[in-house]
Image: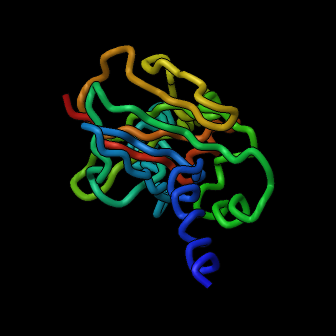
Amino acid sequence: MKKIILLPFLFIPLYLFSQNDTIGVFIETNGVKKEIIPIKQVKTKTNTLGSALTYGIASSNVKVIFNGNSSNNIANKNSIFYFYFPTQCNNEYVTNLFKNPTMSINGSPSNFGLARLKTKSKTRELSFAKINIWSGSSMGVDVNLSMFKTEKIKNNIYKLSFCKDISKGEYAFVYILPNGSGAFFPIYDFSFSL
């Protein structure tokens, strides 16, 4: 009887110290690691007044809007980001698919770019298109990952650390898709302070 009672306790340390990676993006700042919960856009906005007043000479900007003028995820120059991608289509992948639709099987950080968000009083904006009736349209999110050093830890885990200075402000990892359509997917936001 004692052997049966002790048996579960033998597996508890194995469970606690086993690899229990999840899917998503994590931030480690000052030794504290937490998941960045992706946020979704709440609306799309186009400014047509300038274009109308100038008979189409001025471009109209198309933006996606996110609630809050600041992220709950705080980063500094020593922060480290971890990208956890699924390696196979299993129950965990299917469960996380709705929360993290951009985390594709065997993905990599090169599927993302870092975009700066414009801060308003109660919201943040991400511009993804300019439309002009005379010169046409320009679509796409201005993204860059060149300020990061990327290190592959395992087949599905990547570590990103800053290798260049960026200015204080609101940022997000945005999924890169043609014509800026990645702006409509959930983004992984953070506030950068020096």
Can residue 136 be seen by looking at this rendering? no
Q: In which quadrant is the C terminus drawn?
A: top left
Question: Closer to the camera, 153 or 115?
Answer: 153
Q: Which residue is drawn at 51% across and 28% down?
A: 143
Residue located at (54% from left, 34% from top): 141
Q: Relative to residue 152, is residue 163 depicted above or below?
A: above
The residue at 38%/21% (across/down) is 162
Q: Where is residue 20 in the image (x, y as percent from the top left)?
A: 58, 52
Q: How many marks?
A: 0
Depth order, front residue of 44/156: 156
Vertical relation: 144 (above or below) 193: above
Quarter of the rendering occupied by the N terminus: bottom right
Q: Give the left or right position of residue 173, taking residue 2 as reference.
A: left
- Looking at the picture, how far across and down is residue 64, in whole percent? 48, 51
Q: Spot the residue most to the right.
A: 89
Answer with the quarter of the image where residue 2 lies.
Answer: bottom right
In percent of width and height, residue 114 lies at 47, 32
Any part of residue 121 in sight: yes
In this rendering, the answer to whether 34 lies above or below 42 is: above
Query: Which residue is located at x 60 percent, y 32 percent?
Result: 109
Image: 122 above or below 162: below
**Which colour style is shown?**
rainbow
